[in-house]
Amino acid sequence: MEHLTLASERLAAEAVRRLLLGGVVPRPIAWTSTLGPEGVPNLAPFSYFTVASTDPPMLSLTIEPHDSGTTKDTAANIARTGEFVVSIVPEELGEAMWATSADVPPEEDEFAVAATPPAPARHVSPSRVAESPLAMECVLERSLPMGNALLVIGRVVCFHVRPDVLDGRGRIVPERLRALGRAGGRYLGTTETYSLPRDRQGPPGAAACGR
């Protein structure tokens, strides 16, 4: 079957968005906690999220504005305080996470909206999600406007890891983490994984993929 060839500049913005969100999958979810101007906790999920660097450890988070064009509370809070916490969303907290995707007034505590308890961070002011198996405290490294969005780079200054998600070598086991991801407009779990052989050799002189 032949592929469709679609020039992005000739597509409507919504068509481009559908292709990106449906094709760049699965995407992990950064359940991001910040503090509002009056110290009210803000908690919001973002799936434009990945590792930016491992040495030093840094995460990237892309935050689009509201449909109205106004800045989201998370972006404003990070710009003002320079701090945020990313909690990974396990499958059992999916509905709680979904509750915080609503447009909630900044004076409302979104941990209460999610009915999920906070836990204190060690080095930053925002709380982490207590029931998350992995939370990462971040300080703002830099923020860059990218098209209609803001790319936020945070340096991880502290990890909170639940011991039962680790194996004997200190590696996270995906089946124990049970992290939710986005796939288009739907969600998916990460409880079924498989390995590919690492010692497969290609033609003589061929470089190993990804090395």
Image: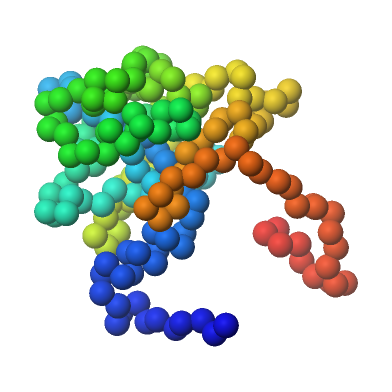
Image quarter for residue 120?
top left
The residue at the far right in this view is 204
User: Quick one: 170 or 156, which is closer to the camera?
Assistant: 170
Q: Position of residue 24 (x, y in %)?
A: 46, 59
Q: Residue at x 29, y 20 (%)?
A: 115
Q: Residue at x 35, y 77 (%)?
A: 8
Image quarter for residue 125?
top left
Of the 4 image quadrants, the one containing the N terminus is bottom right
User: Quick one: 4 or 73, which is closer to the camera?
Assistant: 4
Viewer can see residue 156: no
Q: Position of residue 133 (x, y in %)?
A: 50, 24
Q: Position of residue 87 (x, y in %)?
A: 42, 30
Q: Report whether 72 appears left or right of 173.
A: left
- Numbered circles on residues, count: 0
Of the 4 image quadrants, the one containing the C terminus is bottom right
Q: Position of residue 138 (x, y in %)?
A: 39, 31
Q: Is residue 49 above or below residue 201?
A: above
Q: Is residue 133 above or below residue 21?
A: above
What colouring does the structure picture have?
A: rainbow
Q: Is residue 132 above or below residue 31?
A: above
Q: Residue at x 15, y 25 (%)?
A: 108
Q: Report whether 127 appears left or right of 163.
A: left
Viewer can see residue 31: yes
Q: Report whether 145 appears left or right of 120.
A: left
Q: Residue at x 51, y 81 (%)?
A: 3
